[in-house]
Amino acid sequence: MRLHELAPAPGAVRRRKRIGRGISSGHGKTSGRGHKGQKARSGGVNKRGFEGGQTPFYKRIPKLWRFKNYPFKKDYVVINVELLEERFEDGAEITPEVLKERGIVKQMRDGIKLLGRGEVTKKFHVKVHAISQSAKEKIEKAGGTVEVIDNV
């Protein structure tokens, strides 16, 4: 066998369809697009899920089956720094366990978040699951420390 004798298998190679090259080609005139209608026009393509103006399937089904973020939402117990100022003495270490013992927090949920309403004059060592920027600044300005711990 020589290089010039090599050939593809019978039926493996097909000629390119030449569209719009006269009636006798079989793909002339409408070029295989049929008569009129959106698909016959240039640029006539529908977006995925389009049902010709009918209410699409994804809108007909109940919201129950669509994506929602609430299963992933964090539900923190919120406490303000003014509460710590009232209830704790200077130099106290404040942890979620201490807050629960003192009855400030009834249930943990997804953790405790500390917010910045109120003023801080005492030095606290705080360990919480989340903290606002203003609360962090107030505690550190008063000489305390802040540690963010992993969620429950």
Image: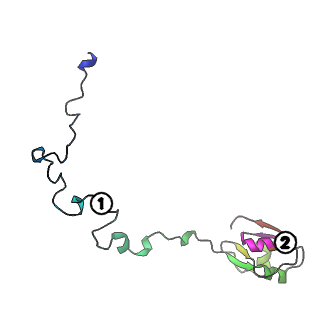
Residue 116 appears in the figure = yes
- Type of residue at label 2? Lys
- Say which residue appears at 18% left-offset and 62% top-offset: 36
- The answer to whether residue 124 is above or below residue 38 is below
> Which quarter of the image is occupied by the C terminus?
bottom right
Q: Is residue 94 left or right of residue 56?
A: right
Question: Residue 140: x percent and y percent?
Answer: 83, 70
Observer-nearest of 40 and 123 = 40
Q: Position of residue 122 (x, y in %)?
A: 88, 77
In the image, 57 versus 93, the foreground residue is 57
Helix, strand, or loop for circle 2? helix
Marks 1/2 in contact by CB < 8 Å: the verdict is: no
Mark seen at residue 141: 2
Judged from the image, the secondary structure of the residue bearing numbered disc 1 is loop
Q: Is residue 124 visible?
A: no
The N terminus lies in which quarter of the figure?
top left
> How crowded is the residue under tag 2: few (<14 C-alpha within 10 Å), some, or many (20+)?
some
Residue at 75% x, 81% y: name it.
117
Res 93 quadrant in image: bottom right
Question: Bounds of the magenta span?
Answer: 120-137
Residue 28 vs 117, above or below: the answer is above
> For the residue carrying disc 1, how many other residues have a C-alpha within 10 Å: few (<14), some (14-19), or many (20+)?
few
> Residue 136: within the magenta?
yes
Frontmost residue, 102 versus 14: 14
Instruction: Give the left or right position of residue 89, taking residue 53 as reference.
Output: right
- Compared with 74, 8 (above or below) is above
Res. 45 mark:
1
Name the residue type under label 1: Val
Number of marks: 2
C-alpha separation, residue under disc 1 versus residue under disc 2: 61 Å
x 24%, y 28%: residue? 8
